[in-house]
Image (cartoon, rainbow, N blue to C red):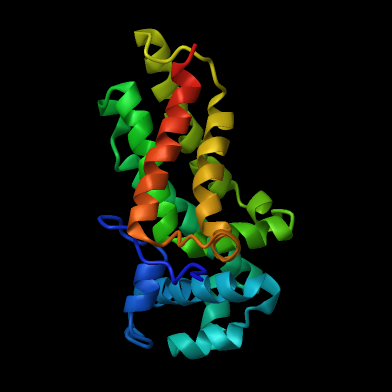
Amino acid sequence: MKTGSATKPASGVDSDIDGPLAAKPVGSVRRNDPDATRANILEVATREFAENGLDGARVDEIADKTRTSKRMIYYYFQNKEGLYEAVLEKAYAAIRAREADLRLDELPPEKALRKLVEWTVDYDDANPHFFRLVSIENINYARCLLRSKSIRQFNRSATEQLERILERGYQSGVFRTRVDPTDLHMMISSLSAFRVSNRYTFGAIFDVDFSDPAVRKRHRKLIGETILSLVTNG
């Protein structure tokens, strides 16, 4: 029985979390390059927090894997929670920046919405650590996220972009059902994230491998059609 193999980035989709972590050799950062040192700490810390949680992750372990010192990590991030908050900010900033690169405002509304949905499936599939971090933050009642004004600020772009796509669709008559953009964002995220957050249990129960490219392709189309039917059926 297949239980869902290790996640592989979708074709044509860069992994903003897994790729750099997997590819960057330990200790490759020069000590006289503070920006690179900080970035390397965040990359290693992302994996540590995603795999072990906020409470389980150890700053000593992060320091050892980056070949820097615990003192240096505290210099940059003050404490473990400060480092965790910086990891969250980086993860959310990455997905919002990649969404902006899609230039959806230049596409007809129906194509824009479909592209956003299918890209979300691919991005989520390529970045499973992002959802581990989100799950950890939910377990902790979003306490770090609530403290971070920057995370809430740049995440507004997700619903603002959907609002523009929907409004263009309503004005052109392509979309006929009024949907709150935040609700639509929730539905897109939920359908896409399920493939990542539940891939091993679902795979074990139903013998389906979510990392199989053919399965991902089928799901991209199915989720896209589901979201589009919600707004196009009057």
Residue at the spot 52% in from the left edge and 35% down from the top edge:
185
Residue 47 seen in render: yes
| 67 over 161 or under it: above or below | below
Number of marks drawn: 0
Vertical placement of 203 versus 166: above or below? below
**Residue 22 sits in quarter:** bottom left
Left/right of residue 28 with respect to residue 93 in the rendered view: left
At x 70%, y 74%, the residue is 55
The spot of residue 98 in percent (x, y) is 35, 48
Above or below residue 130? Residue 109 is above
Identify which residue is drawn at 35% across, 69% down: 19
Q: Along the line of sight, which residue is nearer the eye, 112 or 160?
A: 112
Please state the horizontal and vertical placement of residue 135, each as a whole percent of the image. 63, 59
Q: Nearer the viewer, residue 51 or 164?
A: 51
The residue lying at 72 percent from left, 60 percent from top is 139
From the top left corner, tell me how far across and down residue 146 is, in percent. 67, 50
Residue 223, given in percent of the width and then of the height, sits at 45, 39
Residue 79 visible in image: no
